[in-house]
Image: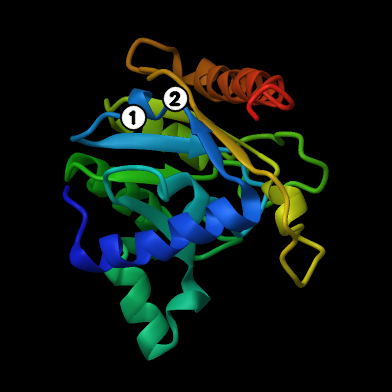
């Protein structure tokens, strides 16, 4: 899946702003396959996360967004043009899970946040069961993604942005085909926790 002209056009100011405001640095970009379906599974610290995860990649990223964000004509058009699709929060949205699987089969890079909500304290919470369904139904590489700092750049209890260094790390691909279903969520969460710990260790040595 190639980047559209709209994607490339918006990626430029997003790159500039993320560098100026957040001194954004990303590690392990080479672990993200250049083509084919891939699942980018990230911890969730801020509304900024989808932009920050995608801004330094050379391929477009698809993602789920709250269904109410699609209600406006322009907003709905823009989100769909940027490969987003709606999900109903607080409900068992089987349709959204099917759309996730379809996007992966179509060759998209799909970014999901399996905690289901933004963190309050920076730790990674329990993963929702829906991600387990996607893991069982697909056989694409799964890239754990750790985000550190975006919580302080835009905390869930804050109404404004703050300038704060943000770091992102893309882990090595994981494959869940041979992992028992009852161990998938634990395996995935452990990989995310370990990656976040590794990312935090880079603080103070990347400048």
Query: Residue placed farthest to the top in the image?
Result: 178
The x and y percentages for residue 16 are 48, 58
- Given residues 175 and 45, the one toward you in this image is 45
Q: Label 2: which residue?
A: 28
Is mark 2 in CB contact (under 8 Å) with mark 1?
yes
Inter-mark Cα distance, 2 to 1: 8 Å
Locate the C terminus and report the quarter of the image it occupies.
Answer: top right
Q: Label 1: which residue?
A: 32
- Given residues 186 and 65, the one toward you in this image is 65
Can you say whether 55 is above or below 141 in the image? below
Res 30 → quadrant? top left
Category of crowding for the residue at label 1, using alpha-carbon neighbours closer than 10 angstroms: few (below 14), some (14–19), many (at least 20): many
- Given residues 133 and 74, the one toward you in this image is 74
- Given residues 26 and 104, the one toward you in this image is 26
Residue at 50% in and 65% down: 88
Per the image, label 1 sits on a secondary structure element best described as: loop
Left or right: residue 77 compared with residue 187: left
The x and y percentages for residue 145 are 51, 32
Query: Residue placed farthest to the bottom in the image?
Result: 73
Category of crowding for the residue at label 2, using alpha-carbon neighbours closer than 10 angstroms: few (below 14), some (14–19), many (at least 20): few
Left or right: residue 193 compared with residue 103: right
Per the image, label 2 sits on a secondary structure element best described as: loop
Query: Residue placed farthest to the front in the image?
Result: 207
Give the tally of numbered discs. Answer: 2
Q: How is the image coloured?
A: rainbow
Residue at 19% in and 61% down: 4
């Amino acid at each position: 899946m190639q980047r559209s002209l709209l994607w490339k056009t918006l990626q430029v100011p997003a790159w500039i702003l993320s560098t100026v405001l957040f001194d954004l640095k990303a590690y392990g970009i080479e672990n993200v396959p250049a083509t084919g379906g891939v699942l980018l599974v990230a911890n969730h610290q801020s509304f900024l996360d989808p932009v920050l995860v995608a801004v330094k990649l050379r391929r477009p990223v698809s993602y789920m967004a709250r269904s109410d964000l699609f209600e406006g004509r322009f907003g709905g058009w823009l989100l769909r043009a940027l490969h987003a699709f709606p999900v109903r929060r607080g409900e068992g949205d089987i349709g959204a899970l099917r759309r996730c699987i379809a996007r992966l089969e179509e060759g998209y890079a799909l970014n999901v946040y399996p905690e289901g909500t933004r963190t309050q304290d920076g730790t990674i919470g329990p993963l929702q069961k829906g991600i387990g369904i996607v893991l069982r139904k697909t056989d694409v590489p799964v890239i754990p993604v750790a985000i550190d700092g975006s919580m302080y750049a835009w905390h869930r209890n804050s109404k404004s942005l703050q300038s704060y260094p943000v770091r992102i790390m893309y882990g090595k691909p994981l494959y869940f085909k041979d992992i028992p279903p009852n161990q998938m969520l634990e395996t995935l969460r452990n990989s995310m926790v370990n990656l976040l710990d590794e990312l935090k260790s880079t603080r103070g040595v990347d400048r």
